[in-house]
Amino acid sequence: MKDINLKNILTEGRNPNSRDLDTKSTLQLLEIINQEDSKITSAIAAEMKTISQAVDLIYEKIKNEGRLIYLGAGSSGRIGVLDASEMLPTYGVGDKIFGYVAGGDEALRIPIEGAEDSQELAIQDLKAINFSKKDVVLGIGASGRTPYVLGALKYAKSINATAIALCMTSNSEFKEVADLTMAVLTGPEVVTGSTRMKSGTATKMVLNMISTTLMIKFGKVYDNLMVDVKATNEKLVARCIKIVQDLTNVSDDEKVLATLKQAEMDCKFAAIMLKNDVSLQKAKEMYQSNNNSLRNII
């Protein structure tokens, strides 16, 4: 077994605000957890400039036919998969952001023993998707030392791809390898070392920020509406109708739905068609001639 020193890893420290947990009442326990969780937003705020740099790096890569690959072990990997999986229904993007967890899809439900300790496994996972220098890997690990993530970061660097890391400790091994490291210092966990808690919540928040900002920059949001949402269920059909109504001030549900169907359930084109009384083909031409932006059309 490799000798691992946890003493200098912030997330492995003991939290003085959560001592004697086994003596607390239900309400006291919940209050302690809630109080510690309230510190997460300020920890993220302190790293905002680095997060912004990460978004800009990723944006340039995706704009030039690259992909963003989230990669992590355990909770970190699962959260990456979760964020990536929302891109298709929310923004209509299914080929630009992907998530991988050590041990593969089975590890989403049950732990795969030893998977996170293998650097080679990460390299195999990246090679399997033809990861290239056009792409970005965003390695996630609260401790900043996860071998699976380190393997991915090193491989990315070896082929001149962009390597970005997200961790919850300042003195991470990731920083020695990655082009850019986001260190969100959430501090010791309520239950010592249980990084599915504050660290996991911070990870979810940061990835939400990154992916959402990217989608806005790529024109997937107009005003604050998800105009590229995919109507894959009844709720999302209803959302499409409401989005088009908000954009056009047309209140007739049946008219809006009929136009959406003509527009192949594309909110952008349906709104242009209704607002300008044009065909789908003309709506597409108008959209393209305005740099794929609704701002000057509706």
Image (tube, grey):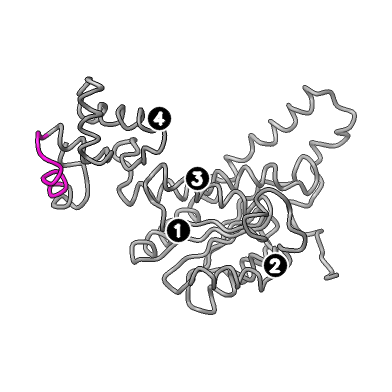
Point 36% across, 40% down: residue? 229
Q: Which mark is residue 208?
A: 3
CA–CA distance in space, label 1 to label 3: 15 Å
Q: Residue at x 85, y 33 (%)?
A: 21
| Mark 1 to mark 4 CA distance (whole Å) | 38 Å
**Viewer-nearest of discs 2 and 1:** 2
Instruction: Identify the mark at residue 30; answer none if there is no mark.
Output: none
Instruction: Point out residue 296 in the picture as x, y percentages from the top left corner.
Output: 16, 42
Mark 1 vs 4, N-terminal side: 1
Q: CA distance from mark 2 to mark 4?
A: 43 Å
Q: Quadrant of residue 175?
A: bottom right
Q: Earlier in the sequence, mark 1 or mark 3?
A: 1
How crowded is the residue under tag 1: few (<14 C-alpha within 10 Å), some, or many (20+)?
some
Dominant secondary structure, magenta: helix
Lower position in the chain sequence, tag 4 or tag 3: 3
Q: Nearer the viewer, residue 40 or 46?
A: 40
Question: In this rendering, would 127 be left or right of 66?
Answer: right
Q: Amino acid at mark 4?
A: Glu
Residue depicted at x 72% and y 33%:
33
Of mark 2 and mark 1, the one earlier in the sequence is 1
- Amino acid type of the residue tagged 2 in the rendering: Pro
Instruction: Where is residue 221? Give x, y as percent.
Output: 32, 42
Q: Does residue 160 show up magenta in the picture?
A: no
State yes or no: residue 280 in magenta: yes
Do tag 2 and tag 1 residues touch (Cβ < 8 Å)? no
Seen in the picture, residue 151 relative to 298 is either above or below; the reply is below
The residue carrying mark 1 is: 53
Judged left or right of residue 207, residue 110 is: right
Q: Which residue is mark 4?
A: 234
The residue that mark 2 highlights is 147
